[in-house]
Image: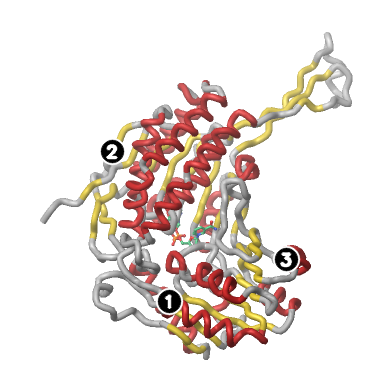
Amino acid sequence: MTALARFENTIDGRTQPSASGRWFPTLNPYTGAAWAELPWCDGADADAAVEAAHRAFISGDWPAMTATARGKLLRHLGDLIARDAQALAEIEVRDNGKLLAEMVGQVRYIPEWFHYYGGLADKIEGAVIPSDKPQMFTYTRREPLGVVVAITPWNSPLLLLAWKLAPALAAGCTVVIKPSEFTSCSTLALMALIKEAGFPDGVVNTVTGFGAEIGAALVSHPKVAKIAFTGGDATGAAVYAQAAQQIKHVTLELGGKSANIIFDDAQIDDAVRGAISGIFAASGQTCIAGSRLLVQRRICDEVTSKLVAVARTAKLGDPMQATTQVGPITTQPQREKVLGYIDIARNEGATCLLGGRIPDAPGLAQGWFVEPTIFGGVSNDMRIAREEVFGPVLSIIPFDDEDEAVAIANDSIYGLAAGVWTGSIRRAITMPDRLRAGTVWVNTYRAVSYLAPFGGYKKSGIGRESGKAAIEEYLQTKTVWINLASSVPDPFVMR
Ligand code: NAD
């Protein structure tokens, strides 16, 4: 038996196994087999990583560096990621089973975040405050928060890390990364590029292992100033509660149950393609999945039959192959969860129009596949319409008019994203105003950019990633008062 590849953490600039010397396997969702091993970290490793990040924040080269020099490091890192994009993407596919074509595109896009925030690093400005007090000079400084713990999920490990790492470093913070235990390898591979780019030791550190074991050690560490978290809402709530004990800053990017709304004046074939990309791309494992498809009743049968016809032809298979359109589910427990929701939907009385099973095609048995699944006859009070499935399962919900579409779309604990398909300019402008979601797409779906703030309303999260807004999440304001008078006036009266 050949030994598995081993990836190591980087703490204080040194690659290393865990303090306990234990390892755990990472599995390939297409083969179901272990393909690499990772350090199984515990509280001792978490503490070492935070201490290293804290040292790097308060002493040494990093705090002494100009913002322009920081920006250059970030831009250099972006170039190195572009150079190694194919290799990083292949690692991600082995870990998360998403299509190589999608992951290569995603990793090739990641440098934009490092270039953009590299450019922003030396444009962080304080202000001189006009003074209402004579002989007083008052100004503000924008200062980094300190040590940031970045916790990422398994669906797009490097992209969602970049959304945190680039603005955090541009702001001057130092970082400890805790990637998902299911997909840590690409993050550990990225650390070699961070070293090559020239970041001082301790500025970026990694700790791999299980959230329940090391999450608390990281989140509650007194030297951590902020947690930037992407994951499920239950974990997010636990992180938020723990962070509150020490009044730490948080950004939470959580789940969704996004409504993708098709009006009867839409280009129906485009809308069908948008609905497919909203739910079957990445096997539905995206936080922005358009898992509730709201269709105006007059065109509901036509849209449904076109959707079923297109989805039926989706080619499931090896995510490394260019012809594959739908890959496996990333983890075995997640596949069980998806199949469980399919049973729940059937029991609730929804009609399974397509899929709903583990595929029996030859060559797929070893992987964690679920057929693209479409349910009709769904009402918005069913669990399949209310809870995040995070898999290739679409619920079609008919509506009569705009008011009803808005009411159904907004009747959710989540508010991450929404889609609107319409030929009406009036609707294209008024519908986004009425939808309670952090992102609304009109006649498109799943567009994101380093330039555009992204985040959730309601239980989908707190704070924004990407765009200028994101750097504010890693900064705090200090106000400085300088007395220019030659003497200090009456000490018993507030100035
Ligand atoms: P998860 O909540 O299970 O895990 C996310 C991360 O949190 C992992 O690294 C995990 O190890 C860690 N973790 C687990 N318990 C912890 C604890 N007690 N303390 C600290 N960290 C802990 O989520 P997942 O299953 O990896 O990812 C899927 C979820 O992520 C979905 O709900 C999806 O919607 C969400 N997501 C959101 C966005 C967004 O930008 N809003 C993007 C992608 C995924």
The residue singled out by tag 3 in the image is 428
Mark 2 lies on a secondary structure that is: strand
Residue found at x 79% / y 16%? 483
Residue 43 can be seen, yes or no: no
The type of residue carrying mark 1 is Pro
Q: Quadrant of residue 337?
A: bottom left
Label 2 environment density (alpha carbons within 10 Å; few <14, some 14–19, many ≥20): some
Tag nearer the camera, 3 or 1: 3
- Which structural element holds mark 3? helix
Q: State left or right for residue 269 relative to residue 106.
A: right
Q: What residue sits 57% from the left and 50% below the top?
A: 449
Which label sits on residue 150? none
Q: Position of residue 463 (x, y in %)?
A: 62, 51
- Which residue does the image show at 61% across and 71% down from the upper left? 259
In this view, the residue farthest toward the top is: 486
> Circle 2 sits on which residue?
16
What residue sits 62% from the left and 69% below the top? 413
Residue 334, visible in the rendered structure:
yes
Which is nearer the eye, 262 or 344?
262
Question: On residue 372, which mark appears?
Answer: 1
Question: Which is more foreground, mark 2 or mark 3?
Answer: 3
Whole-percent x, y for residue 70 in the image: 52, 28
Say which label, 3 or 1, has the lower sequence index: 1
- For the residue pair 128 and 391, the one nearer the viewer reads as 391
- Vertical relation: 294 (above or below) 225: below
The percent position of residue 22, horizontal first and vertical second, equals 24, 49
Secondary structure found at label 1: loop
